[in-house]
Amino acid sequence: MKYAIETIGLVKRYPTSSRQGNIGFFHGPGRVSSFGGFLDILRGNRGPFIEALKGVNIRIREGEIFGILGPNGAGKTTLIKILCTLVLHDEGEVYVNGFDPRKEAGEVLKNLQAVLPESRGFNWRLNGRQNLEFYALLYGLNDNEARERIDYLLDFTELSDRANDGIQRYSSGMLRKLLLCRALLRNTPIIVFDEPTADLDPVSAAEFRKMIIDRLAHEEGKTILLSTHNLLEAQELCNRIAILDRGSVMACDTPNNIRHLITEDRFLKIAFKEAVSGDEQVKLLKEIETVQGVHNVTIDVGEDGSYGGLSLRIAKDVELSDILKIIMRSGLKIDAVNTVEPTLEEAFIAFTGHGARRGPQPRGGGEGTRRYQ
């Protein structure tokens, strides 16, 4: 199978800022003891290294929307810079549509374009169309090709009505769309997004996500790699995600499968009708806790003191009927039994020990699960 992006044992090291010992102009700790020591600093002889990426293995299929999820400092930006030929890796292999960024940077850039929100590079004295014409000229498009492509992209991003407005009048969402237009001028098959909806209001972010799915993925057939902190975004957009932490891939699978990697247990909520909290319910709780495979039971009590139900964490092989028989013997009436799915946030925290930005995330196909150490 041909992969749009493939990394094999990818390693990237960065030197630490200084070497312990004599690195100042005067003698003593933190001082340079000689002019030669000063030259060592200028030459980059800096001592120990830190590993930003530690043997990263990722395979992204053609036409797939693939997410990189991880806390700050996990290595997401370093990975993107390597793919974009901005940083050279130290060990391992990298391929973008079969081309090596170290040896065939020009071919890589014909196949991949990055959309980075912190680097706009637009001329504020020009309108939206003029900015795109300027970049089309830089990219080597001829006049007819540029005009046709720009018209298409402005219509594609619904900016046609504002194309002749100065971009100082554009909203953040419109500027993000103009960035996308610029990225698509060369019509590369792979698009890389770094925090695509950062700083956008919820409506603009939802529109941008919809455009990624409906237009770029489904209509254009692009392969999309996005790095994000937003768990809702990852779950809504991505066919598969990789959780990256401290330079290592902790898990790589569909968002749904990753949510279920954190535990082999089932989570249940049992709701009761017209139940009142009391001593009998405490006895019921203790009896259920004696059932083999029941790992945790808590009582759900309403604000009015009503006995709403039970929340349970049980092993997958536990017979639910054993628990229901105990409840029925107590005289309680069961209103509903629901399975509670673990959230992507719970999985993220379990793998990394960090929280992440959720957005308004409600509780709730790719290759098999992979874990890397």
Image (tube, rainbow, N blue to C red):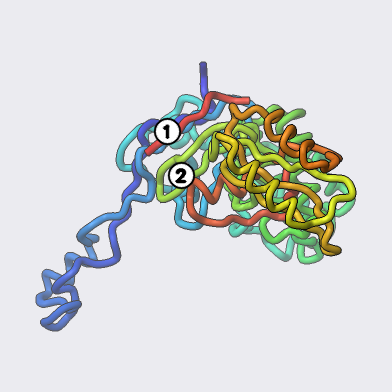
Disc with the residue nearer the chain's start (2 vs 1): 1
Query: Can I make out residue 144 in this image?
Result: no
Amino acid of disc 2: Leu
Between residue 240 and residue 121, name the one nearer to us.
Answer: 240
Work out whether residue 93 or residue 174 is closer to the camera in this orientation and state it.
93
Residue at the spot 65% in from the left edge and 44% down from the top edge: 343
Looking at the image, residue 15 sits to the left or right of residue 213; the answer is left
Q: Which residue is mark 2?
A: 79
Residue found 40% across the figure and 36% down from its top: 372
Disc 2 element: helix
Q: Which mark is residue 21?
A: none
Disc 1 marks which amino acid? Asn
Q: Residue at x 52, y 19 (%)?
A: 2
Q: Is residue 62 positioned above or below 314 on the image?
A: above
Callout 1 secondary element: strand
Vertical relation: 39 (above or below) 363: below
- Residue projecting furthest to the top: 1
Q: Nearer the viewer, residue 66 or 3?
A: 66
Is 373 left or right of 232, judged from the image as shown?
left
x, y percentage for residue 26?
Answer: 14, 83
Query: In terms of image quadrants, where is residue 85?
Result: top left
Left or right? Give the position of 88 relative to 220: left
Which residue corresponds to mark 1? Answer: 57
How far, Cα to Cα, is label 2 from label 1?
Answer: 11 Å
In the rendering, at what x and y percent does residue 5 appear?
50, 30
